[in-house]
Image (cartoon, helix red, strand yellow):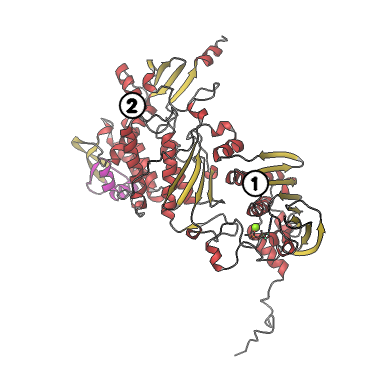
Amino acid sequence: MRELDVTAGPAPSGRILVLPEILANQIAAGEVIERPASVVKELVENALDAGARRIVVELEDGGTRLIRVTDDGQGMTAEDAPLAFLRHATSKIRGQDDLWRIDTLGFRGEALPSIAAVAAVELTTRNAQAPTGVVVRAEGGRVLDVREAGAAVGTTVTVRDLFAPVPARRKFLKSLQTELGHVVELLTRVSLGAPRVHVRLVHQGREVAVHPPVATLADRARQVFGADRVRGGRAFVDERLGITIEGFAFSPHLSFATARYVYQYVNGRPIRDRALQHAVAEGYASLVPRGRWPGAIVKLGVPPADVDVNVHPAKHEVRFRLAHVVHDTVLDAVRRALAGATGRGDAGEAPGVAAALRTYALRAVAAPALFPAATRSGASASAPTDTPGVAEADAAATAGAAPDAPDACGAPRGGFASLRFVGQVFRGYLVCEATDRLVLIDQHAAHERVAFERLRAQHAAGAIERQALLLPLAVDLDPGQCEAVTSHLADLAALGFEIEPFGDRTFLVRAVPALLGDDDPRLLLEDLADGLAEVGSQLSAAEALAAVLGRIACHSVIRVGRGLAAPEAAQLLVDLDALTYGSNCPHGRPVSAEFTRSQIERMFGR
Ligand SMILES: Nc1ncnc2c1ncn2[C@@H]1O[C@H](COP(=O)(O)OP(=O)(O)OP(=O)(O)O)[C@@H](O)[C@H]1O
Ligand SMILES: [Mg+2]
């Protein structure tokens, strides 16, 4: 057997060798520096860590030619400045224990050396104690020179010709517009995360965005997204088991194809956590159409020891020690914020329904009995606090919609019951009159909404009314549906169904939820089976519950095409007022639309 001399550098075959430092840095850069926006992210995070109150980002050619980030933070001493370019050199942690109490955005000591490995960097900095500043130039992962220079307190980092040393990377860059778009998105996230910091973005000498300091998250959201998008949203704050939450829930009338407008922060750090996204979506439950995402900003304060931020090179992901508590806190906070958003002020109407909903919310979260996915520990079985969870009502939202568009949001002022029912049109819409406006109500959506909320309340009380069928009904299902129904018989029973297997693919239905009236239970059962099959694969318990209740509600209501007598219409209006949630039906369609008198008059040129 041949002996290996491990002290003598490369093995004779020369196959393994330690990489030169520049190459190692370029490889490390590959993990965190993907595009101009990643450079901006690292530099802006450094500025925030340095306590900056004002951050200016300047770009040329989407950041590919030049990125300059200027901050008014604490700066560095002349000794520290060149050290910042050494790999694993950081002022932010000292020892292993510090990894568990990180309260800065950076801690790896990799960003600056990584950037300097793939671009030319010039850093100018001055610490408040120092009479002058210092300029450090670095390239190829090494410091080229350090010289004294006059400078304001703070730091400016200029990054030129990104990826020039690694042309292969450059090829992956998209159009300048796309790269600029990524930077805008990044700065949006930064701005929302730090409302008190002045953030400004300049591209080719032109100001692209400027967000002066504001006091609240809602103000920042308004600044960043514009008043229109923020209208109807709700700010919220909450606290549970040492976890704090502050957030802003956009109106349920806005929905998006992806979760990109669900902004999440943990201890000031922007993250992307799928479980959190789902918690937010669950909070909106059926207010947003299925398959669509709401918009929301969620900021969590978690004791540093309860969250591991050292999971992902770019720190987009974190790991929570009490993931389910975090999940439930978010879900509850969002739900309560929205429950307050009735679009007609926050009068303490219908306490019975509100209480039932609250119980329901807690059950759905802990979901001890429902669906296999619901085996999370019951951390939220504690009583809900009485804080309304709404810090701030958007005055514009409660005041109704913009005068120019037919309003599809929220109930009319004074409530639905104050409306005068004029008649029904197209056998599916109620025409109603208020003093200063015309209100159209989608009869089906309205009934569905009412039925849905009633089911929620009944389910929460553990008492969904059931109605026995005169004759048991045999229903044939396909194998997938059979499997779903068989494994959820108990859950279906809790929802008011009495079902038993009857042969291979047949089930006997003996009772159905009373709310269903005389709708054919066959269709509903098929529908439910499909839903449950889907549930098994992707939905969480609370989502599943909402989906199932929504389906039952949908099957239980007056369809479009049915006439409606005045007393029935009046009852529907009264029932609508008892709803705690907004005016969306379980599928997320609006219930009512309004035309103001002046709009109508304008149509006729008055
Ligand atoms: N804008 C700045 N103002 C003051 N100090 C800075 C600034 N940018 C960098 N530094 C100093 O340089 C050090 C190195 O920065 P770098 O971004 O490379 O690492 P880090 O922020 O410590 O960790 P990470 O790699 O996770 O970002 C920092 O720890 C900090 O002390
Ligand atoms: Mg850093």
- Does 119 sit above or below residue 486? below
Q: Quadrant of residue 42?
A: bottom right
Q: Position of residue 32 (x, y in %)?
A: 64, 58
User: What residue is at 51 percent from the left and 58 percent from the top?
Assistant: 304
Residue at x 59%, y 36% (from the top left corner): 225
Which residue type carries mark 2? Asp
Q: Along the horizontal axis of the image, is 477 left or right of 148? A: left
Q: Please state the horizontal and vertical placement of residue 265, each as a whole percent of the image.
A: 54, 49
Q: Looking at this rendering, what residue extends furthest in the left direction?
A: 470
Q: Is residue 459 left or right of residue 1?
A: left
State left or right for residue 597 relative to residue 203.
Answer: left
Q: Quadrant of ligand 2?
A: bottom right
Q: Which residues are magenta?
A: 476-505
* Residue 575 - label: 2
Q: Is residue 33 magenta?
A: no
Which label number is shown at residue 182? 1
Q: CA distance from mark 1 to mark 2?
A: 47 Å
- Give the quadrant of residue 569: top left
Return the mark for residue 590.
none
Relative to 355, say whether 48 is above or below.
Answer: below
The one nearer the camera, 70 or 575, is 70
Residue found at x 69% / y 48%: 174
Most distant residue in the top direction: 606
Instruction: Verify whether residue 493 appears in magenta.
Output: yes
Q: Nearer the viewer, mark 1 or mark 2?
A: 2
Depth check, front residue: 123 or 446? 123
In the figure, 551 relative to 299: above or below?
Answer: above
What SS does tag 1 mark?
Answer: helix
Going from N to C along the chain, the mark reached first, 1 or 2, is 1
Q: Quadrant of the C terminus?
A: top right
Label 1: how many residues lie within 10 Å, few (<14), some (14-19) or many (20+)?
some
